[in-house]
Amino acid sequence: MKKSNGVTSKSAIKTAPKNSAKAPAAKKKKVLFAASEAVPFVKTGGLADVCGALPKILRKLGYDVRLVLPRYWAISREYYGLEPVLRTMGVPTGNGVVWCQVFEGKVDGFPVYFVEHEQFFGRAGIYDDGNWEHPDNAERYGFFSCACLQLCRDLKFKPDIIHCHDWQTALIPAYLKVWYGNDPFFKDTASVFSIHNIAYQGTFKATAYPFLGLGSENFVESKFENFGGVNFVKGGIFYADAISTVSPTYAQEILSEPGANGLSAYLNRRRDDLFGILNGADYDHWDPETDVNLPAKYSARDLSGKKLCKKALQQEFLLDEQENVPVIGIVSRLAEQKGFQHLAVVMHRILRDMKVQFAIVGSGEKSLEDFFGGLPALYPGRVGAWIGYSNRKAHLVEAGADFFLMPSLYEPCGLNQIYSLKYGTLPIVRATGGLRDTVRQYDEQTGSGNGFLYHDQTPDAICGTVGWAVSTYYDRQSHLAQMRKRAMLEHFSWLDAAKQYEEVYRRALARRASWR
Ligand code: ADP
Ligand code: GLC
C-alpha cells in the first residue's frame, strides 16, 4: 500500500499541482541544505537520516542541492576524501571576522561542504562532551550559520532556497533578512525552516547575543528574546519564509501548549506558512531484502530469513534461543521525550507476568542507562541490553524482533516505527505526532491494522498495550501474520515528501518576492 504524506496547510493542499515534479518552474532550482548532522557523516538521531536522504531525492527531481555541515573532529578528511575548496574564508560575526576553511566531499553524487574551524568543531562530541553541553554552542552554531551564507558567496553558489534544520541553523533566516535583505547576491534567496523537535530551541544567556551580530532591535520578545535570554528557534520562526515540521499531527500539536514548548503563540502568528510533511524512509539503507547488516535477507513473500535474524539477535543479546517467545525490540535515545521512565515503572511487572524477551539498544540519560543496562543481570536470557550507539545492532533489532516499542511522550515524526513496519516488526507506540500518522491500530475483530497504539501517558497504558501485543502473538497468530505482511508492504516515500517540499519552496519564494 502506498502511503501518501500530508501537508497541513489547507491552501497548500489546494495549490499543490498533481505532478509537481514536472512543473518547469521548479526545475534546476538551487537549494542549500544547512544542517548540523547528516548520514553518513555524523548522526545523533533522525535529523541525520532526513538530511542524508531528502537532498538525494530532491536531486532526482532536478534540483541542484548541496549540503553544508560543520567538519566535526570525528569526520575524517582522509576517510571521506574531502578536498579543500576555500582555503581561507572570512566569516563576519558580531565579534568581527572569523577565519575558517571549507572542504568538499561527495555523497550519492551531490556535493557536501564542510566548514572547518578548529576551535569550534575540533573537539569530541557534537553538541556535548558526554556529560555537559558545550558551553559555546551559541557561538559555534551562530558562526556556522554565518559561514553557510559566506560560503555561498565565496563559491558563487546563489541558492534559491536555504533549507535550515532545527535550532542549530535557525539563525540563517534572520541573517538573510537582517544582514542581506538588500544584498544583490541574496536578493532572490528564500529560507525554509524545518522543525524536527521543538523541545530543543537553542536557548542561551543574553551574553551570547552580541556575538550573533543581530542588533538590539532583534533582541525583543517577538523575535529572539525569551525570558531575558536568547532563543534561536523563536527568531527562526519569525524570519523564515516558510516553516515546516515532520508530520501533519505534530504540525497541529505545536500550535498549542504543551506541544509547542512555550512557542505556540509565535507559531500561530505564522500558521499560514506552517506545513506538516511526514518524513520518508531511506529504503536504500532500511530494507530487509537488501540490508547488508543482517545475517539473512527476507521479504514479505518469504519471511524465512526473519527467523534467522531472530536467532542471531537472541545469540548476540544473550537471550534464550526460543523461536516461539516474542522479542520486543527497542532502539532509541534514552531521553525524557521517549517515555522510557514510564516503561521502567512497569518493566518488572511485564517480565513477571508475560513470557517475553527484550533486546534493547540505547544511550542517553544516565539513570535510564543504568536501569535498562542493569536488567540483563536480573533477567538473564530474557533481557539483552546494549548501552551505546551501534548502527549494525539497530538494524539487527529491527529485523530480529517481533515487536518494536516506542512509548514516546511526544514524537515529531519518529523513524524507527517506519523502519519497523518495513521489517515486519510490529510497532507498539503511543498515539502522538508522527507515530499516530504512521501506525494503524490493530482491530481484534477483523485483524486489520499494522501495530498497537495507546493514548494515556502512563506506565499502565504501556503495560496493557504490551500485554495486548504479546497475547496477540500467542493467541491470534493468523492476525499477526497478516499484520506483518501488511506492515511490510507499507511505503513511506521520500519522493512524496520531496514533492510536498517543492510546494513549500514555491510558497517560500513567493513570500520572499513579496517581502522585497
Ligand atoms: P530521534 O531523532 O528523536 O532520536 P527518530 O526515530 O527520528 O528519533 O530517529 C532515531 C534514529 O537514530 C534512527 O535511525 C535510530 O535507528 C537511530 N538510533 C537511535 N539510538 C540509536 C542507538 N543507540 N544506536 C544506533 N542507532 C540509534
Ligand atoms: C527529531 C524527532 C524525531 C524525528 C526526527 C527527524 O529528532 O525527535 O521524531 O523523526 O527529528 O525528523
Image: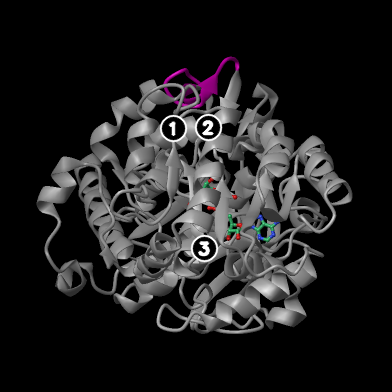
Q: Where on the image, by quarter, is ligand 1?
A: bottom right
Quadrant the C terminus occupies: top left
- Please provide percent x and percent y for residue 256: 37, 23
Q: Quadrant of the N terminus?
A: bottom left
Asked whether disc 1 touches disc 3, contact meaning CB atoms under 8 Å apart, the reply is: no
Measured in 3D between alpha carbons, the distance from the residue under mark 2 to the one under mark 1, in whole angstroms, is 7 Å
Above or below: residue 60 compared with residue 328: below
What distance separates the C-alpha of mark 2 from that of mark 3? 20 Å
Image location of residue 346, percent across then percent down: 67, 33
Q: Earlier in the sequence, mark 2 or mark 1?
A: 1
- Foreground residue, 269 or 290? 290
For the residues labelled 2 and 3, say whether their Cβ atoms are less than 8 Å apart.
no
Q: What secondary structure do most residues of the magenta stretch adopt?
A: loop
Mark carried by residue 461: 2
* Residue 24 figure quarter: bottom left
Nearer to us of marks 2 and 1 is: 2
Q: Which residues are magenta?
A: 217-228
State the residue lying farthest toward the right: 377
Q: Secondary structure at mark 2?
A: helix
Mark 2 vs 1: CB contact within 8 A: yes
Label number found at residue 455: 1
Q: Is residue 146 visible?
A: no
